[in-house]
Image: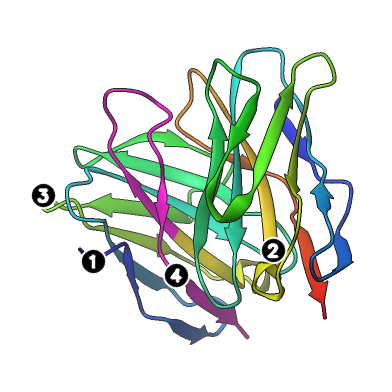
Amino acid sequence: DAGVTQSPTHLIKTRGQQVTLRCSPKSGHDTVSWYQQALGQGPQFIFQYYEEEERQRGNFPDRFSGHQFPNYSSELNVNALLLGDSALYLCASSLLEPKFYNEQFFGPGTRLTVL
Amino acid sequence: AQSVTQLDSQVPVFEEAPVELRCNYSSSVSVYLFWYVQYPNQGLQLLLKYLSGSTLVKGINGFEAEFNKSQTSFHLRKPSVHISDTAEYFCAVQMDSSYKLIFGSGTRLLVRP
């Protein structure tokens, strides 16, 4: 059973560019959450998608957007990249029902470097 | 607003010694509590969780944690650590009405031979 997969593993961009990160959830999961983990810090919640809609959003600017496809996979898009966007981006999948606290399974992350 | 504090950024310990990683949280509502481990170049793995019931929670790899509501703490313990336990450990909370996990800044456990 494949777990959560993310692509690419590493990415280098320059300021002002746009980037798209991809996530495939664990088999059977219908919910995808994205987190940003800056160096030396804990992950911070960006947003969660369920049924192709954003259900909840953290304190991130509109430059961060996402999408969920009918097969439950998801993309995270970041526009107008800033140096401060350099981080490890983690995707987590879970089942929405029956409870909020269903375990979130994390992928290995995408390391984004903005120069 | 909810927050999680992990007071120790790094905890060095000798192999086979006991260890405690501290976690305190602040919240005005009921929360669920979690400990995750992150090995180098990997994602997060759930060690254990407290949802309700017994305040002593047992997890994988011999770890356990105790929920103390009066002290708003959820400290992680292991009676005897191994070299392979060297990793970053994150405490997290989730409100009953929210989907997001709020993480602490992490504690690096360094096990020495």
Q: Chain of mark 4?
A: A
Q: Kindly identify which residue carries mark 2.
A: B88
Against A91, residue A50 (above or below) is above
Residue range in magenta is A91-115
Q: Residues within 10 Å of mark 1 (few under 14, many from 20)?
A: few
Say whether disc 3 or disc 4 marks the residue closer to the N-terminus.
3
**Image quarter for residue B53?**
top right
- Left or right? Give the position of A68 relative to B12: left
Tell me which residue sits at (82%, 13%) in the image: B70
For residue B73, side relative to residue A16 (left or right): right
The residue singled out by tag 3 in the image is A70
In the image, are marks 3 and 4 on the same chain?
yes
Q: Determine whether label 1 and label 4 are within 8 Å by CB.
A: no
Which residue carries the number 4 mark?
A108
The reply to the same-chain question for discs 3 and 1 is: yes
Q: Is residue B92 above or below residue B21?
A: above
Give me the residue at 23% from left, 66% from top: A2
Q: Amino acid at mark 4?
A: Pro
Q: Which residue is mark 1?
A: A2
* Tag 2 near tag 1, CB within 8 Å: no
Q: Is residue A110 above or below residue B57?
A: below
Tally of numbered discs: 4
| Label 3 neighbour load within 10 Å: few <14, some 14-19, many 20+ | few
Whether A106 is among the magenta residues is: yes
Q: Which chain is disc 2 placed on?
A: B
Q: Quadrant of the N terminus of chain B?
A: top right
State the image quarter where residue B24 is shown: top right
